[in-house]
Image (cartoon, rainbow, N blue to C red):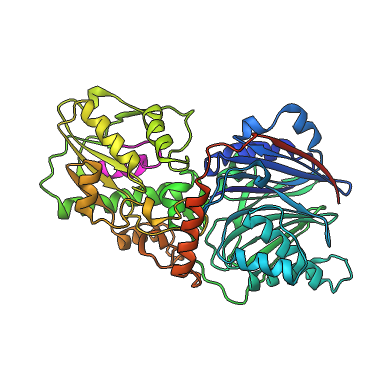
Amino acid sequence: MCGILGVVATTPVNQLLYDGLQVLQHRGQDAAGIATAEAGRFHMHKGSGLVRDVFRTRNMRDLVGNWGIAHCRYPTAGSATNSAEAQPFYVNSPFGLMLAHNGNLTNADQLKQDMFLQDLRHMNTNSDSEVLLNVLAHELQVASQNRYQVDPETIFKAVAGVHRRVRGAYAVVAMIAGYGLLAFRDPYGIRPLVVGRNETPQGNEYLVSSESVAIDTLGFKILRDVEPGEAILIDVHGRFQSRQCAERTLHAPCMFEYVYLARPDSLMDGISVYEARVKMGEFLAEKIRTTLPHLEIDAVIPIPDSSRHAAMELASQLNKPYREGFVKNRYIGRTFIMPGQSTRRKSVRQKLNAIAQEFRGKNVLLVDDSIVRGTTSREIIMMAREAGARKVYFASASPPVRHANVYGIDMPTRGELIAAFRNDEEIRREIGADALIYQDLDALKTAVRAVNPAITQFETSCFDGQYITGDVTPAYLENVETARIKSAKPAQDEDGGQLDLNLVA
């Protein structure tokens, strides 16, 4: 899960890109970067940390130009926190290219080998995004027939070549020196990508973003989602072109985007995240009503923030009081993303504090969006009991997370998942709840599909172990798990350094 932005405007874009990254900060708190272009020269600044910490006024002054891309990162699939792997990435052969990527390539190791042995390209980092950049660069060279001239036909052919070679999930924004902004999405549409437009007296401006919330807040109007397998090309003069570049496509967006990752005010693939979460609460209430009617619930309390809308609807459907029982410290990062179990346990207490008056002497139903490792759930239930709750029931708006996610979400090993080798009763005992209720997968799919019936399939591998790209083998999952254990993701890179580059394209 990362946040990406691409902008072609009629005025300087440095502030637009910075503001957009702030809006997408929830998608990655590990590193951030911005690249702009002016007069054949790329300008870039990137580093480890939050957007507000990476960029200073002096950095922003150097990011000149009317078009550019931006990225906020969190590490995935065993990768280490390292400022050298902050995005965007750059290559200058055969054309000056900058690229930022959200997702995870499942055949990155094979592609690296091909790059070295066949394409004669060398990787400087362990990032699959750098692999993707070099694949795109090579395909551009092939499509141009070594003439080193770029045009729309060449670019679209190159993206088609990328789709033929690359496997996994990827949403991409890239800058092609002297030409413009390229954005494309994998043939399954796993990771989101939305495009917006702003009409000005000087001409149309375009913005591509992981979520529509960035388009809204920056004053653009949503144009549409980038389709699975589609490429969008916007030249430096604001001319917009698009083409389907994949031979076969299947629209299957990641379900976890709607459960947890995206902001509730976003609209992705025609689905309002807010409405989807409300529907999750409705279906979860029905399950409680039919399977656990004996529960004596005095109050329904959400675990802030992403479960709030589901909890409100659940309380309404069950005709139970809705209460805010936890106060959230908004200056602590998401515990789901934080490295290390000990760091996670400590951060839960720093992040949430119980309001004792809402728990004392009551039977409370706590509602969360999901249970991943179980660490947070266990700590929160303990907090509720310490605040005086008589009984603590726990409900998850999504099904048990039993399998690794290899498409860009940081849950790569089954050993870390509380539900991987336990049944519901064992999980209930492990987290210390008096009752545990999970959403059914079919109900979850129905709930989200109700918001946009045109989406008939979803990527749900973390719940059911069915990997939609068809290339994820047990051996691959074992390799990912081994890599994660070896990396043991340090909380901070060695020197916390930041990179400032001015690159001649």
Q: Which residue is drawn at 47% across and 68% down?
A: 475
Q: Residue 347's spot in the image, x, y percent? A: 41, 32
Count of marks overlaid on the render:
0
Q: Residue 477's spot in the image, x, y percent? A: 46, 63
Relative to 316, say whether 140 is above or below. below
Q: Quadrant of residue 463?
A: bottom left
Question: Does residue 459 appear in this view?
Answer: yes
Q: Residue 119's spot in the image, x, y percent? A: 76, 69
Q: Which residue is drawn at 54% across and 63% down?
A: 189
Relative to 329, say whether 127 is above or below. below
- Residue sitting at the far left: 294
Q: What stretch is highlighted in magenta?
A: 302-315
Residue 313 belongs to magenta span: yes
Q: Residue 453's spot in the image, x, y percent? A: 42, 64
Question: Does residue 218 appear in this view?
Answer: no
Which residue is at the front of the view, 95 or 202?
A: 95
Q: Residue at x 81, y 52 (%)?
A: 236
Q: Residue at x 16, y 38 (%)?
A: 297
Q: Quadrant of residue 323?
A: top left
- Residue sitting at the far top: 357
Q: Report whether 89 appears left or right of 213.
A: right
Q: Report whether 254 appears left or right of 157.
A: left
